[in-house]
Image (cartoon, rainbow, N blue to C red):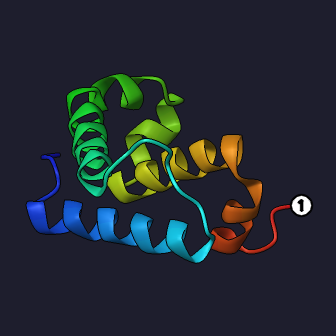
Amino acid sequence: MAVMSDTDRARVWRGLMRAWSAQHETVPNNLKADIRAAVDAMDTFLNDNASTVNNALPTAFKNNATNAQKAMLLACVALARYDVEALRRLLGEID
């Protein structure tokens, strides 16, 4: 899978900026351009390491899940590690 288009990367960046602003959060000592660069870097990292992530999955899931399902799994596990409330907003009840 290729990296996201510039338009999609900008959507992620704008979404993060809006969400953090609505929650009155900031990333200290970072400009908007720094956060955009972080989105770009993470997208590139995930693209460059997609096979490593895929190979970490159990065979049945790896062979049968769609790329979208694998991405959702990755996103949910990462979100659960850092912000369970955000995961609840995404998935609904998780307990």
Q: Quadrant of the C terminus?
A: bottom right
Q: Position of residue 94 (x, y in %)?
A: 81, 63
Give the residue at mark 1: 95
Vertical position of residue 82 compared to residue 72: above or below: above
> Would you say 5 lies left or right of 55 here?
left
Viewer-nearest residue: 88 or 40: 40
User: Is 15 in front, or is 61?
Assistant: 15
Say if 94 sits above or below 41 in the image: below
- Residue 84 quadrant: bottom right
In the rendered view, does 77 fall on the left or right side of 73? right
| Residue at 39% in and 24% down | 55
Q: Tag 1: Cα neighbours inside 10 Å, few (<14), some, or many (≥20)?
A: few
Question: Which quadrant of the figure has residue 50?
Answer: top left
Depth check: give the residue in front, 64 or 21: 21
Pinpoint residue 25: horizontal percent, then vertical percent: 59, 61
Instruction: Identify the residue shown where x is 42% and y is 48%.
Output: 64
Q: Position of residue 59 (x, y in %)?
A: 48, 30
Q: Residue furthest front?
A: 29
Residue at image coords 29%, 48%: 39
Instruction: Please give the name of the residue rendered at 15% of the width and 47% of the height, measured from the top-left corner.
Output: 3
Q: Quadrant of residue 7?
A: bottom left
SS at circle 1: loop
Q: Is residue 47 above or below residue 36?
A: above
Could you say which is closer to the camera, residue 15 or residue 72?
A: 15
Q: Amino acid at mark 1?
A: Asp
Residue 1 percent location from the top left of the image: 17, 46
